[in-house]
Amino acid sequence: SDNRSRWPRRRPHSVVGISESHGGEDQDEDMEDVDEEMATERGDSNDPAADKNVASADGGSSEYAEAGQMMVSPLKFDPSAASSSKSMMRAGGSRPGSDIEDNDSDDDKKPSASPLESSFEFDPEAASTSKSRSNPSTPRRQISKSAMKASPARSSPAYRLGKAGREGNGLYLVLHGDDVHPSSEILSALRDLYSERRPGDIGPAPFASGHTEAALSKAVRLLRSEGDLIVWGVKELVAEAGPVQSALWRDGDYAATERVGALVLARARLCSSRGLVVSIKTRDELLAEQRASAVIRWLGTLAKSCDPLCNQVSSSIKQNEHLAPMLRADLKLPAAITSAWHSLLLTLLAIPNFKAALANAYCDTYRSVTNEYARGVGVLDRSSYTLSVQFLNRVTYVSDLVRERNLMGVLSRSLLDIFIVAAVPVGPGGRAFSAKEAEARRSRFNADPFAREFGFMPSYFGDFLSPWARPGEEAEDLAQGRRGTRTTAASIASHGEIWLGHGIRKPSAFPSEDALVTTLDPNHPVLTHRRYSPCISDLKCVLNVPGMARLFASVPLPAPLFAAGDDISSMTDQFSFLYGWIQVLSLGQNMDGQVWRTWGQGHVERESRGWVGAFNASISLGSLFERLLSWDDSDPSPLESTAKTRRLLTCAELAHFIMTTGLYSWQRSEMLSYHPSENDQTLSLSDQLHSYCPSALSYCTIASNRGTALASRALPISQVRPWSFHLPLHRFVASCLREVALRPADGNGSIKALIAMLKNVGGEGEMKKQILLQGLAEFPLAVLARAAQIRAGLWKRNGPAIVDQVLNYSEPPFCRSLRDADLTLLQFALIGCQPVPSGDKLSNTSVPSPSDLGIDCAHLVNLILNRFGIFDFCGLQKAPDSNVDRYHEEILAGIYPGEVQRSMQRVGVGIDTDTPSPSSPPHTYSPASKDVAQSLALLEEALHLLIVLVTELPAPPPVDKRDHLKQAKSRLRREVVHKLASGPKTHSELADVQHVLPHRDTVLLNEEGKLVNPDDASGAALEAALEEVADVKVSRGRLTAAADQWEVRRIVWDEYDP
């Protein structure tokens, strides 16, 4: 049997043992053997049988000797061991060998003890451990190298770290600067680091000295300026470990080595637990970094001296051997090396071959660097991202990277990886969990065997795969990154069967959490500190290269369509930019949810600043929308190789693809979380009333008398359900619709062609179209209605930050990608989804068929009246109340669902039951029923919305470029007039009007502006518009110089449209 199985169990605060014992009797016998062995070695036993037992017990004295060395409690006092460590340290004894496994030969070579060592002092700590290896006169045991290698405890991280520190002449804890943590958090971490508090203790650090605070503040400023700072070194380590343990560590003692390593790790964890980035380095490594920095600076000086030496230096730096490893470690390099390295690279970029090699290495290492940067490692100003502009704005390099290394797919996948870091699951009622809550629920899910076996989460909200599933390696890669699948409507039934099959009672209604998706945490550092901005900037550079945006609207060809001889494997392995883009936008849906505070709740006490990060993310993503669509349907592919493997889509086909895949799947999953509440007749003006959400919305009697049904399908949205200003996937669809509207009306990519694509569906496609079109109207309208409530003063209890969000949502310059996009979706839902007449009617009734349903004018107006809460305020009467029999017939016909009654919930009837409601029709709700002034304000907001919907329509498609330029000038003139209508403005205050214009208009105006002023093309176009509509108002009589202002002319006031 293995002798190591009988070694005693490790005890706390002692030298590490080798393995655990198996049974109390064996452990007692082992301890007796060890006592005899240790007594024999000390010369306390004269029994030759004992000596023989020690020499041959269980086949190996070395293993038992090592086991005795690892024990603490059974040892007796040994004066020689107590004195050897400190006396040897005072006498300046030689250090052991570099490797603990070779200590036998090293100790034999040590000199004899000096006379000073005879005067020793008692040290209980040294006496309780193994005999010091520093005194060669002390008898020692021979340690087996094979036993030492076989020991699993020898590979502990703390021991390896302590051993590396001994061999590297010391350990140092280095704190790396970042642009995530404010100075106050770094100061707090340093205060705890330098306190007397042990790691793991609870309570504040005992600091009271003002001088200490001043010193720590200087340390923080030094970290900001230099980038790296040694915050814990050998001096602090020796003081914490004590002189005896430090001496034993230098002598190679295992326990002391592990103890020193554990102390350094504890200090590192103290900093890393606060999110700081730290590294543990030896003194030799720090000296090597200084030498490396000096060498790189010397190479930079050589490269700058003359062109031949520059060519020689560039040719010696290889792409895979030097550039790729250096770029991969770029964020973790010391600031001195990074500065010298980037300076050298900028010098060598003058060599075309080196620039191409650097571009290839940059693309190959992009994902790994981006993943580290998303997790808080590195500073943007001292990263390789600053070099990308040197080659990502060149057609040659970008074309090669896209063709050979799938650059656009890499950028899209990297952007997706960044946002996955900040993704959190959505809880009941649409509330997003925080990162801590998400991790806790994920842990509960992992601990649930039932959930692990069947892969779904009854109530734990783990990660989800994607908003829309697709086969292939891409789905597998995403599954590895997201770990989990999301429950859909089709899988809920199968899950119910699983529950019954395992003897678990099936609930009356499956938990709504299973259908919910994932969103972004607005308080995550990825959003609050915009860690995605380098990837967005690189995408803009690539999209500015002519022809690159055309590759965005492309899908892979099926394998049978590949030409003979094509490498199909390399083509199918590439990650599609379009697929990744849809994933990114889906993650941003409904981030930073807002919840209305009811009348019974007080004013919010503390406002979160997460909305700033959410708006920055939406605006950054929105800045790419029109750049991705800046191409014409007739534009060819910029790369000949892609023509064989990918099919280019028209703008109409692109819009149809995104709507019927990504948008439809997200809306379907999101709609599964909306459940109607009970139709209780006892509802009053209370919190229960604010949570009321009917299954259908009642039409007014005026509409029903003119051919509509008595009610219409609608999402059951209550006033207190969380909602969000951010719907990036919907708004990208709106950008696609704007571009489709610019296509010729008689072409295959026109708005008519898109409408035909959506209508030419049958079978299951009818339900798909209904979900798609209902979501196109419902989700944007919910945001518009909540914004109107905020302007009407109904959200004052939520704090002033909600008003700031409305201003960013509905006012220039960001309104184009936010509010205006929502209006575009409502317009398309109205004009593109008219009901198709059907001859399938109910007998003896005028009830329409379900196939007749669509987003028509009556439906849209009814939605606005109910979402704004002004149905009753307008004096309208509910149609179901006037004809209850017809209301039940329409429910039976499937026109809309019936209301959920309290009795139905008691018996477990599902929500989507065909059983008609036995009681009253749905109620109406208004959040402003207590205040007439607020109701009047909501009515004004609703009327203004209707006016904008029917007047602010997309312009007709331009005939040619000249016609397009004329329209662009007209739109610029209109924006300038409305900007000046509020008062005189300076030239700088008028500069943001171009942000409201379409990207195509801005490009055309800049092209013409370059002919007038090449240095300020955009300013020249604005000057031309100002000269037509405004006069300069010169500032006079002021003590300080002020800029001149522009004032609108009287003759132009007729163009103002309030």
Image (cartoon, rainbow, N blue to C red):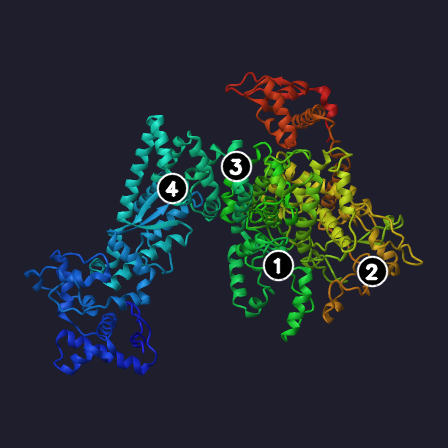
**SS category of the residue bearing label 1:** loop
Query: Residue 817 appears in which quarter of the rendering?
Result: top right
Circle nearer the N terminus (1, 4) = 4
How much space separates mark 2 and mark 3, taking CA atoms?
61 Å
How much space separates mark 4 and mark 3, taking CA atoms?
21 Å
688 left or right of 382? right
Query: Residue 464 appears in which quarter of the rendering?
Result: bottom right
**SS category of the residue bearing label 4:** helix
Q: Nearer the viewer, mark 4 or mark 2?
A: 4
**Rendered residue at 18%/67% (across/down):** 131
Give, as a three-letter code, the residue at label 1.
Answer: Arg
Q: Nearer the viewer, mark 2 or mark 3?
A: 3
Question: What residue does disc 2 label?
Answer: 891
Residue 624 in percent (x, y) is at 59, 38
Question: What residue does disc 1 label?
Answer: 486
301 left or right of 355? left
Question: What residue does disc 3 label?
Answer: 400
Question: What residue does disc 4 label?
Answer: 322
**In the image, farthest residue toward the front:** 564
Residue 31 in percent (x, y) is at 25, 78
Q: Nearer the viewer, mark 1 or mark 4?
A: 4
Q: Is residue 1047 above or below residue 359?
A: above
Give, as a three-letter code, the residue at label 3.
Answer: Asp
774 left or right of 473? right
**Number of numbered tags placed on the structure image:** 4
Circle nearer the N terminus (3, 1) = 3
Circle nearer the N terminus (1, 2) = 1
Circle nearer the N terminus (2, 3) = 3
Dots 4, 2 in contact, CB < 8 A:
no
The residue carrying pointer 4 sits among few (fewer than 14), some (14 to 19) or many (20 or more) residues within 10 Å by Cα, namely few
**Rendered residue at 94%/58% (across/down):** 844
